[in-house]
Amino acid sequence: MSSFLTPGSSNSKTNAATLALQGGRPVRTKPWPVWPVWDRDAEESILSILRSGNWYRGRGNTVSQFEEQYARLLGAKRCVSTVNGTGALLTALHVLDIGVGDEVIVSPYTFIATYNVVIGSCALPVFADTDPETFQINPDKIEERITERTRAILPVHILGLPANMDRINAIAKKHSLAVVEDACQAWLAEWRGKKCGTIGDLGCFSFQNSKHLPCGEGGAVTGNDPALMDRVYSYHDCGRPYGSVAKTSSYPIIGTNRRMTEYQAAILISQLKRLERDTETRWQNAQYLTSKIRHIPGILPHKLYEGVTKAAYHLYPFRYQKAYFNNAPRERFLAALRAEGIPCGGGYGPQYRDGLIEVALNSKNFKRAFSKTRLDRYRDELHYPANDRLCEEAVWISQKLLLTGKRDMDDIASAILKIYENRDRLG
Ligand SMILES: Cc1ncc(COP(=O)(O)O)c(C=O)c1O
């Protein structure tokens, strides 16, 4: 590898096979695992729920069983399941009394639902730029975004890699802010041995079809404060008094219906059986893959913060630096990698520059909730250069590919190396 050190120079053409993109033999023809995977033992419980007619949680105990099992697995005191991850986040913000006119600090590098839930709560999503090495919110950029209206930090453990929770919790404590963890991609990821989703005030999860713990659509809020979790339960169940809420209120408080169904919970209970094993496989394979690709020039594997004791790897990310690949655009690199039999993608774009934010700022609610001066300043500050660069350079490999073995990781590394060796013919 020592010869691969200068951008643009090619010195290994002789032993490189022709790129599959140009008619050569792909590195990989063997199929990758499919997702989701279901177990026959789920059939019996789903069928018995179907036949019982007790499909809603008020007439069964499957949802409660799942909540107990998931809370135990995470080391959280409580878990309340919801219809989806978006609903979990909206519920968490509501019970923490975050709403009209408030500001929430969030990473711009996330699935759009994280933006949506803040805007949907009539609060301002104030972005702190991304740390491109870890793909997470940059803790150094948070404090400069805090105003007298800031009420919470919403770190996203994006791609299943933990955000820097020591720094985030310390900043939150200093400024008396709540912390809601968007752990919608981070089932069983760990920060200093504690599971993501149990480190802030509340954690939120998604169980949508593509997720590591899937049931089609589903979500959960986790937390350790019984009174707060009573409010979560009550709010998700039409505001019916529950636990400590019942002691202070004999009538329904403001609520919504985000209850999970019994048959969804049955799927989740069966999926839980594989979650720990799969998480370990992804974790081991990701570390091995990093060791194989870290020396390829122009390929920068993601870094994990020192406090990460496990990452969930919903996606395995690295950065592609085109200067080392004969200036071939990332899209060309992605096409070449796919042609070699390695499914991959480029990930999120700079969504904060899409129309969504401007529509929100121009809405009746936002104009009522925030002064013109605040909204103008917000527009002026809407520049996140590190995030923009990351959006141009990122390459994502799906979690499915990590559910294999070392020889399969070797295929990914070989395909990337082959493209590097053929970089003169890539541009
Ligand atoms: C980071 C993140 N936040 C929130 C969500 C929303 O979850 P759901 O799709 O279950 O509503 C997702 C789902 O993909 C997500 O990836």
Image (cartoon, grey):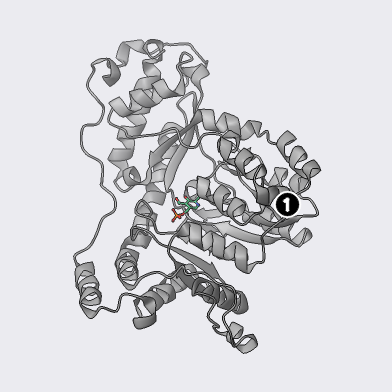
How many numbered callouts? 1
Residue 83 at x, y percent in the picture: 42, 64
Q: Quadrant of residue 176?
A: bottom right
Above or below, 197 relative to 372: below
Q: Residue at x 63, y 38 (%)?
A: 358
Q: Residue at x 46, y 52 (%)?
A: 185
Residue neighbourhood size for the residue with mark 1, other residues' Cα within 10 Å, grouped as few (<14), some (14–19), many (≥20): few
Under mark 1, the amino acid is: Arg
Drawn side of residue 396 relative to residue 194, left or right: left
Drawn side of residue 113 relative to residue 413, left or right: right
Q: Is residue 77 visible?
A: no
Q: Residue at x 49, y 57 (%)?
A: 86
Q: Is residue 271 visible?
A: yes
> Which residue has dot 1 on it?
368
The C terminus, quarter of image = top left
Q: Nearer the viewer, residue 106 or 121?
A: 121
Q: Nearer the viewer, residue 359 or 7?
A: 359
Above or below, 189 relative to 378: below
Residue 315 at x, y percent in the picture: 42, 44
Return the residue found at the far front: 364
Q: Quadrant of residue 350?
A: top right
Q: Residue at x 52, y 55 (%)?
A: 309
Residue 328 at x, y percent in the picture: 45, 16
Drawn side of residue 74 relative to residue 215, left or right: right
The N terminus, quarter of image = top left
Q: Secondary structure at mark 1?
A: helix
